[in-house]
Each structure stands twice: as structure tokens, then as C-alpha cells.
Amino acid sequence: MNRCKVLVVDDSAVVRQLLSELLARDPEIEVVGTAADPLLAREKIKRLNPDVLTLDVEMPRMDGLAFLENLMRLRPMPVVMVSSLTGRGADITLQALALGAVDFVTKPKVGLAQGLGDYAEEITDKVKTAARARVRPLIAAAAPVIRLANAQAAPAVANRFRTTDRLIAIGASAGGTEAIRCVLERMPPDAPAIVLTQHIPASFSRPFVDRLDKHSAMLVREARDGEMILPGHAYLPPGDHHLRVVRDGARWRCRLDAGPPVNRHRPAVDVLFRSVAQAAGSNAVGAILTGMGDDGARGLLELRQAGAATLVQDEATSVVWGMPGAAVRMGAAQEQWPLDAIAERLITLTRE
């Protein structure tokens, strides 16, 4: 069996050694080299031909983002970013994902043995998944949406969606930050309410929401416990909280909780989908976008069994077809659609 060849790029010698040791524990991974900065990494990529790069987001001699942008234009390859849990680290990581990085992990806590077992499992899983991911050459990102305070929606669209009797639920993981952006930027400003779950660390949720809000005509918000769910709004849970939907008379509200992780995740897509199946049933539409693992597949099946329309992103346009593929194999998905057609299809299904 061919092992996944990994090049570790980090300016810290201690982190390079730790990541190399953790990755080398997996018999399916071979660490072929390390590099202290992007310029050295560029030479070692040519010589060692790795399958996957782990890349520190903040590097000396050349900015990590500039290096990644050049790499994805000239030699696209799977990259897993290694990010600090700071506001700046979150912003840089989200930019890296927009540039084409497959996924990210947080910086390991050097000197703390506790928790390294879980960390080793996370990074090896993500590196092996990245090796199978579909990496595409970098293309220009869409410009942020500019909202005009006095702008009026087209009457045909405005009249169609002035109701709360339709709800869209979306789940995603690896590759999902950009997939969700792609869907939301194609939604009309008064589309049915959308509730979303994306696997993301707690410190990343606010920058992620702010980034989505800039690219969508809808209002994208961090959900608040007990908040009423309204058309024209998209809701994501704050970091480290599950998002559920509960019925309140003829309307729905957000319910947040910090209960145990489900499928190793908090927030978990299954938690959201199961609540939508119970609260909205056939008034809902469920969708799973690109992602690693199988979180959301069982919840999507429950949505379908409750009468909701269900779909997944197709394999050809998914960075990682783990979650969508699991849903298809389970019989949870009625349809498969390429990413750039999903928003329009979701709107069509809410009209039927």
C-alpha cells in the first residue's frame, strides 16, 4: 500500500518535530521532510513531491497566505493549515480556505501530553482525507455583497417568500466554509430562513459568520438561544454549541446547548437535522455539503423520513465526499447537485 507522503512546514522546530512524530505514528503516513519557511518548502516540494502539505498560517520570509496563493495557482496540491486559536489566526485560516486549503487543525499544545492522543487522531485523519481531496486551481473569489439601505427586493421574489412555513437546513465540514459561502451568496435577500452547522472551532465561529455576512444578501448571524427564526436570515451556532430548532406555535426558534459532542463534533450536523425533522418535518429542506466523515447522514435520513426534501453536493464538486457520500449510501439523499446549482435548487424545493 502506498503511504501518504507529507511535508511539514512550520517556523518552530519544536512544532515541526511534534507534528512529524504524531503523523509518523500512523502506518499509512510517511513524513518525507520538514521546512522552516515557505522558500525552503518550495524547494522541498520540487524534490520530494509530497502528497500533502501541513502549513503554518504565519511564516517568516514569505507570508503563509502569499505562499499558499502561489502554490494553488502554479502547483495545486492538498494543504492542511495549522492555525492558532486567535482572532488573527481565524481570519488568516478562513482566507487560506478561500484560497484552496482543504482543511485546518489548531496548533498543538507543545509540552502538554494530555490531549495529544485526540490531536494525533484529528491531524492524521485530516491529512489522509486531504490526500484524497479534489484540489482545483485557484480562481478569483466573488466580491462581497454591498447592501443598500433603501434597496427593494424584486416584487416577484419578495411576495413569494414572506412566510416562515419553509426552513432550509444545511450541514458541512471539510471544504464547507467556501461551499456555504457559495450557496449563501446565491440566495435572494428574502429567501426562506436557513439554519446551518459547520464543523469549526469556537474561536472561529464569529469571524466565519462575519465573512459569510459580507458575501450574502441574506443577513447571516450567530444564533442566540430562544431567538425567533425569520425569513431572509441565516443562523449558525456560536462556537462549541449545538444548534437545534424548536417549534413555538406557528414559528420556530433557535435553541443552543453545550451538550456532549455527537460524532465527535460540537456543533454536530445530526443534532441540527434531527431537531428540524421533529420541528418542521415536510416544511423543511435538508442539504449536506462537502465534508469528512458521516455526521449529518443519519439526520438527513430522519429529515427524509419526516417528509422533507433532501439533497447533497455531488462528488465531482465536493472537496471531500465523505458526508455527502455517506448520506447517499444510507438512502438519505433524494438528489445530488453540483455546488453552483444548489442554491437555486433549494429555493425551487421550498416552493413545491
Image (spheres, rainbow, N blue to C red):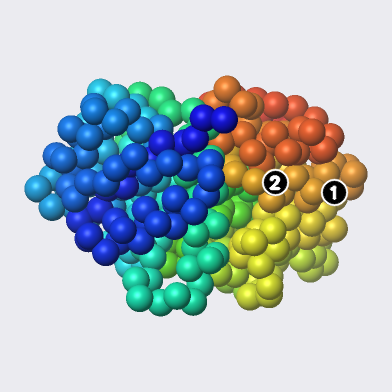
Looking at the rendered image, the disc whose residue lies closer to the viewer, 1 or 2, is 2
Q: Where is the C terminus found, in terms of image quarters?
A: top right
Q: Residues within 10 Å of mark 1 (few under 14, many from 20)?
A: many
Q: Residues within 10 Å of mark 2 (few under 14, many from 20)?
A: some
Task: For the residues labelled 1 and 2, say whether their Cβ atoms are less than 8 Å apart.
Answer: no
Q: Is residue 55 above or below residue 183?
A: below
Q: Position of residue 111 (x, y in %)?
A: 35, 76
Q: Position of residue 119 (x, y in %)?
A: 49, 63
The residue singled out by tag 2 in the image is: 294
Q: CA distance from mark 1 to mark 2?
A: 14 Å
Q: Position of residue 107 (x, y in %)?
A: 36, 63
Residue sitting farthest toward the left = 61
Q: Is residue 315 above or below residue 271?
A: above
Who comes first in sequence, dot 1 or dot 2? 2
The residue singled out by tag 1 in the image is: 302
Question: In the image, 119: left or right of 337?
Answer: left
The amino acid sitting under disc 1 is Glu
Specify whether residue 119 is in view: yes
Q: Which mark is residue 312?
A: none
Which one is nearer the viewer's eye here, 244 or 159? 244
Q: Where is the N terminus found, in terms of image quarters?
A: top right
Which one is nearer the viewer's eye here, 214 or 44? 44
Specify whether residue 187 is in view: no
Q: Position of residue 149 (x, y in %)?
A: 38, 50
Question: In the image, 42: left or right of 293?
Answer: left
Assign a secondary structure to mark 1. Answer: helix
In the image, what residue occupies the spot 82% across and 38% down?
A: 330
In the image, what residue occupies the spot 29% across and 42% down?
A: 33
The amino acid sitting under disc 2 is Asp
